[in-house]
Image: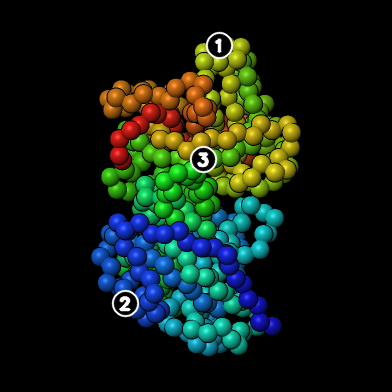
Amino acid sequence: MEQRIKANENYQPNHVPRALKVIAGQSGTERREADSDQVDGGIQVVRRSFLAIGTKHAFICEDKLVKIPQAHAAFLERLEEIPHRTGNGLMIHGIGEETGDSRLEKCRVTAEVSKLERIPDGMHAIELPETQYAYYRHRDGIHRIGDTYSKLHLWILENGDYGEGCMVEVSDEHFQVVEDDSIVHVYVPFKEKEVEGYRPYSVPQALKVIQGSFFPIKGESAMNAQGSVQTVKDLKLAAVKCVGLTNFGQLIPDAIERLVGQLEQIPNRVHPEIHFGVAPCSKSQDEQETHTYYIAVEVDDFTGVPEQFDCIEVPANKYAVVRKEIGGVGDVYGIVREYMNGQQLRKADNDQEPLAYQLEIFYETIEAYHERVTGVSEEDFVMDVCIPVIYDRNI
C-alpha cells in the first residue's frame, strides 16, 4: 500500500539576507551541480525541496553507529524496486510519528526520486516542501560527520537560528558507510535573525550532542579544557530542587534518587544521554540557608510535567566554558575563574531579568550518575562547567 509523508506543509522560509548566497529557482540537476562546485569549508544558504522513497527507522541514539549501517545495507538490497530514481541517496532525520519514547532517534533511509508513484510494499513516499537550509559539503570519513554538524551548529547560532523541517544528508545512493573519503551534502533547516522580537527556537535534538559534546569540538571556537566562550540556546529543564548547605552532601544523592525514581512521569523529555546541574545567579546563593542547586533533565515542553518538579527556563546566553575530563570538579571551577580573569569576562549580574543560571552539563544519563553517586560505579565522567557572562565581542 502506498504511504506518503508530507513534512512541514505550511512552512514558509523568511527572506534571505543579501550577505548570504541563495541557490533558488533551480532544477534538481542544477542544484546538484551548484553543490558540487562549492569550495570545501564554506557554508551556503540554499532553498530546495526533496522527493524520496524509502524505509523508516527508530533506534536508541547509542545504537546508531550499528543500526544506521544495517538499515542502509538492507535498503540497498531493495534499491532496484524504486522507480524514477535520480541517483542520490537521502538520509532524513527528524521526521515521523511520535513513538512515545524520547530516547528514540527517528530517520528515513531513502532514494531521491523525480516522481512519487508505484511505492514498493513496506516503503514510504516522502515529500519535503521547498525549505531554506544551511548547506555544507562534508568530504571525509562518515565517522567524522559530527565535525560537520559542529561547524553548522556554530554557524547557525552566529547567523540566525534553526528553521522548521528535517535535516537531510545527500550522497550517491550506493554510498558506503565505511569509506574514508566520503562526500555527503548536509542540509539543516535555517532561518536568519529577525531584527525585532527575535526569539530562538530550541536546538533540534539530533544536533544537540555531537560526538559527546554540547559545543563545537573543531575550529577556532572549539571547546577545550583551558576555556572558551560558547553560546547556549534557551533550555527547558524539569528539575529536583536542593536548598541549603547544612546537609548538602546528603541533599544531592536524595535528589538524584527522587529524580531517577520518577523519570517515567516526565513527558516530553529529550536528550536522555545527558543531564544538568543548575544554580541561579542570585544573591541568595551567598546565604547558607538559601543556597540552591537543581538536578535536572531537559524537556521540549513543560506540558504535563508533574507538580513535584520545578520547571526552569534557562535563557539563551554566552558562557565561559571549561571541560572536565579527569580530576576533581573543584579544579575545573579554578580554571574557569582563571580563564574569565585572563579574558576580562564578567559573570552575569545576580537577579537580573531574565534570571541567568550557571550550568553543569554531565555527559552521562541520570541513571549512570545515580550509580556513581551511590558507589555502584566508579567510572570517571565528563562534564562542562558553564558560567554565564556579559559578553559584547564577536566570537
For the residues carrying marks 1 and 3, which lies nearer the camera in this image?
A: 3
Judge by depth and name the residue closer to the eye, 387 or 76.
387
- For image coordinates 58% across by 58% down, the residue present is 105
Marks 1 and 2, how far apart at CA: 63 Å
In this rendering, position of residue 45 left or right of residue 204: left
Callout 2 secondary element: helix
Q: Position of residue 95 (x, y in %)?
A: 58, 64
Marks 1 and 3, how far apart at CA: 28 Å
| Badge 3 amino acid | Asp
- Count of residue discs: 3
Asked if one can make out residue 31 in the rendered structure from this viewpoint, the answer is yes
Callout 1 secondary element: loop
The local crowd at label 2, few if under 14, some if 14 to 19, many if 20 or more residues have their Cα within 10 Å, is: few
Q: Which residue is labeled 1 in the image?
A: 287
Marks 3 and 2, how far apart at CA: 37 Å
Q: Position of residue 308 (x, y in %)?
A: 73, 31
- For image coordinates 63% across by 76% down, the residue present is 4
Q: Which residue is labeled 3 in the image?
A: 234
**Residue reaching furthest to the left:** 39
Q: Is residue 330 above or below residue 119?
A: above
**Residue reaching furthest to the front:** 196
